[in-house]
Amino acid sequence: MKHLLLALACVAAAGPAVADEGMAKAKNCLACHSVEKKMVGPSFKDIAAKGGDAGKLADSIKNGSKGKWGAIPMPPNRVSDEEAQQLAAWVLSLK
């Protein structure tokens, strides 16, 4: 039991959560995007290959955008600022 509590304390102290495909799925990003291939929106790897600023990508994730990847706009998403930043960092890490 002591080891379990120590492990939990270490995990809690590790800092903010890091986004991954699980968060993308939970936030419904995978309804329009995939890691590898274009769907309604571009693949996450295509977004990463284009590069760009994590802050601007986080803003697009949270507030939506239009005209960046074609005619279909990306709607705003119900994510916190922190979640948008985490998702943007994860997407850009897929280069």
Image: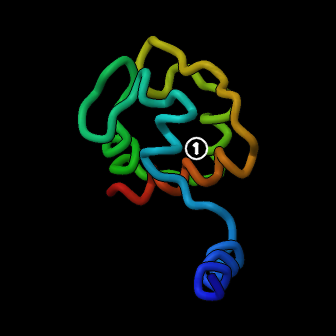
- In the image, is residue 24 above or below residue 65? below
Check the picture and name the quadrant holding the N terminus.
bottom right
Question: How is colour applied across the structure in the image?
Answer: rainbow
Which residue is depicted at the point 71% across and 78% down? 13
Which residue is depicted at the point 57% across and 33% down? 27
* Percent of width and height locating residue 87: 55, 48
Check the picture and name the quadrant holding the C terminus.
bottom left
Depth check: give the residue in front, 61 or 50.
61
* Percent of width and height locating residue 90: 48, 55
For this orientation, the residue located farthest to the front is 1
Amino acid type indicated by mark 1: Leu
Label 1 CA crowd tier, 10 Å (few <14, some 14–19, many 20+): many
- In the image, is residue 61 above or below residue 67? below
As drawn, is 86 to the left or to the right of 46? right
Q: Residue at label 1?
A: 57
Q: How many callouts does the rendering have?
A: 1
For this orientation, the residue located farthest to the left is 37
Depth check: give the residue in front, 19 or 62.
19
For this orientation, the residue located farthest to the right is 81
> Would you identify the image quadrant in which residue 17 lies?
bottom right
Q: Which element type, helix, strand or loop, lies under badge 1?
A: helix
* Percent of width and height locating residue 11: 62, 75
Which residue is depicted at the point 64% across and 52% down? 85
- In the image, is residue 80 above or below residue 16? above
As drawn, is 72 to the left or to the right of 65? left
* Percent of width and height locating residue 68: 49, 27
As drawn, is 62 to the left or to the right of 30? right
- In the image, is residue 3 above or below residue 14? below
Which residue is depicted at the point 32% across and 41% down? 35
